[in-house]
Image (cartoon, helix red, strand yellow):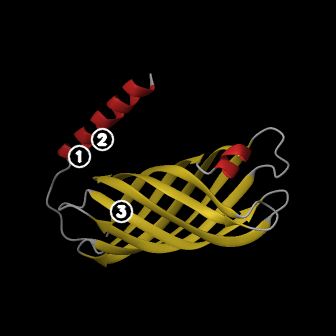
Amino acid sequence: MKKSFCISFSFVLLSIFFSTQQTHAQKLFFLFAHGQYALPADSYFKHNYNYGLGVEGGAGIGTSRTFLVATVGYTSFKSVSGNSFGNTSYVPIKGGIRHYLLVGKILFIQVDGGVGMIKNNFVNSSRFSGDAGLGVKLGPFEVIADYDGFTRGSAENSGYSSWIGIKAGFRFGM
């Protein structure tokens, strides 16, 4: 079931891509909005949380293939049964760079760093947050797979709480 869905979804995305290939004026500014599904990656976070759902939005400004980006978002992580920390909310504010790898601005990498506000039953603080991802832009639609996370503090085991995020949404150039 999942495999056939992935193949069908990929076919739809490729169809959109080939049907929207047109020459456009160079855009120096863009806005974006994504939904996110997050799957905990490190052992501590994976042991305490099942998944996360969230949204993010931001803007980019630049020339040619490299853009400075600013992002703000919200993700809620669903805790496993018996986790005394409860659900965790994460609100990142980040700045970074997006660089398009191929002619036509289809494939890109994006790296961000900033601060994430973390809140659950025991923690209410700001932490370093960073992510790195690879994305595909097909017309106004884009999909990004990235590795994201934040540093843990004294109330938890020290380290870096991390997850693999799949983000999908729209990008509007101006």
| Circle 1 residue | 17
Percent x, y of residue 64: 23, 74
Residue that extends furthest to the top in the rendered view of this protein = 1
Q: Name the quadrant of the N terminus.
A: top left
Q: Is residue 117 above or below residue 53?
A: below
Badge 2 or badge 3: first in the primary sequence: 2
| Circle 3 residue | 109
At 47% from the left edge and 58% from the top edge, which residue is drawn?
A: 33
| 165 relative position to 92: left or right | left
Circles 1 and 2, Cβ within 8 Å, touching? The answer is yes
The three-letter amino acid code for the residue at tag 3 is: Ile
| 155 relative position to 105: left or right | right
At 57% from the left edge and 48% from the top edge, which residue is drawn?
A: 38
Q: Is residue 40 above or below residue 171?
A: above
Q: Nearer the viewer, residue 100 or 15?
A: 100
Badge 1 or badge 3: first in the primary sequence: 1
Q: Which of 159 and 33 is in front in this view?
A: 159
> Closer to the observer: label 1 or label 3?
3
Dot 2 falls on a residue whose secondary structure is: helix
The three-letter amino acid code for the residue at tag 1 is: Phe
